[in-house]
Amino acid sequence: MDLQQRLEALFAPTLEAMGYEMVRVMFQGRSHPTLQVMAERKDGRNMTVDDCADISRSLSALLDVEDPIQSAYALEVSSPGIDRPLTRAKDFVTWAGFEVKLEALVGVDGRKRFRGKLLGLEGEAVRLFADGAEVLVPLTDLKSAKLVLTDELIAAVTRDEDPQADQQGNE
């Protein structure tokens, strides 16, 4: 198990107990290492600065006890934001109908980078409509995926509605 997986396993129960879901954990940087934790509220409400501060305090205490990282680092806690990364299988279902950029680890039809309309999941693969064709990218081959900031996305998020409900009238 690599460091990211160990940190995810360490943080998930604490975040769940506090009413949050983990979106992403990343440890990066050589000269100034940073541990980035991205979370969202389980109740669907927007994250506040106080939410981030509460999470930061709890995770800091957990990190002090468990000490999984041997070097000095900065802890950053944030919400995923509007143009959020898509990291969990459920994200690809929830945000279907919106524009997305994704990068694959392995080429699909000779390409690794795609931008198009997210169609959801088909089994264990992300469905995407890009450049006039449907593309399937296995979740295991996904390097990164994120929503593209569009007027449609902003409208859906600022109405504070379920993004899935917003798309059902368009299909």
Image: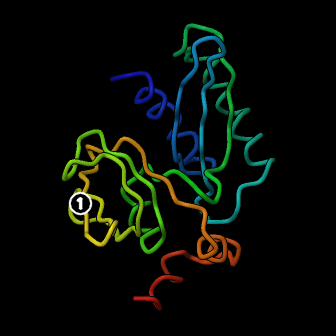
Count all numbered tags in the image, as a single digit: 1
In screen coordinates, is 168 left or right of 41?
A: left
Q: Residue 171's x, y, as percent?
A: 39, 88
Describe the colour scheme in one phrase: rainbow
Identify which residue is drawn at 57% across, 13% down: 30
Identify which residue is drawn at 68% across, 38% down: 77
Which part of the image, by quadrant, shows the N terminus? top left
Q: Residue 110's x, y, as percent?
A: 21, 48
50 relative to 68, above or below: below
81 relative to 72, above or below: below
- Dot 1, crowdedness within 10 Å: few (<14), some or many (≥20)? some
Q: Nearer the viewer, residue 131 or 49?
A: 131
The residue furthest bottom is 169
Q: Residue 7's x, y, as percent?
A: 48, 28
The residue furthest right is 50
In screen coordinates, is 44 left or right of 110?
A: right
79 relative to 99, above or below: above
Q: Give the amino acid type for the residue marked by disc 1 in the picture.
A: Leu
The residue furthest top is 70
117 relative to 77, above or below: below
Identify which residue is drawn at 60% across, 47% down: 39
In screen coordinates, is 50 left or right of 84?
A: right
Residue holding disc 1: 136
Identify which residue is drawn at 37% across, 46% down: 103
Q: Residue 24's x, y, as percent?
A: 51, 42
Q: Nearer the viewer, residue 124 or 107?
A: 107
Name the element at disc 1: strand
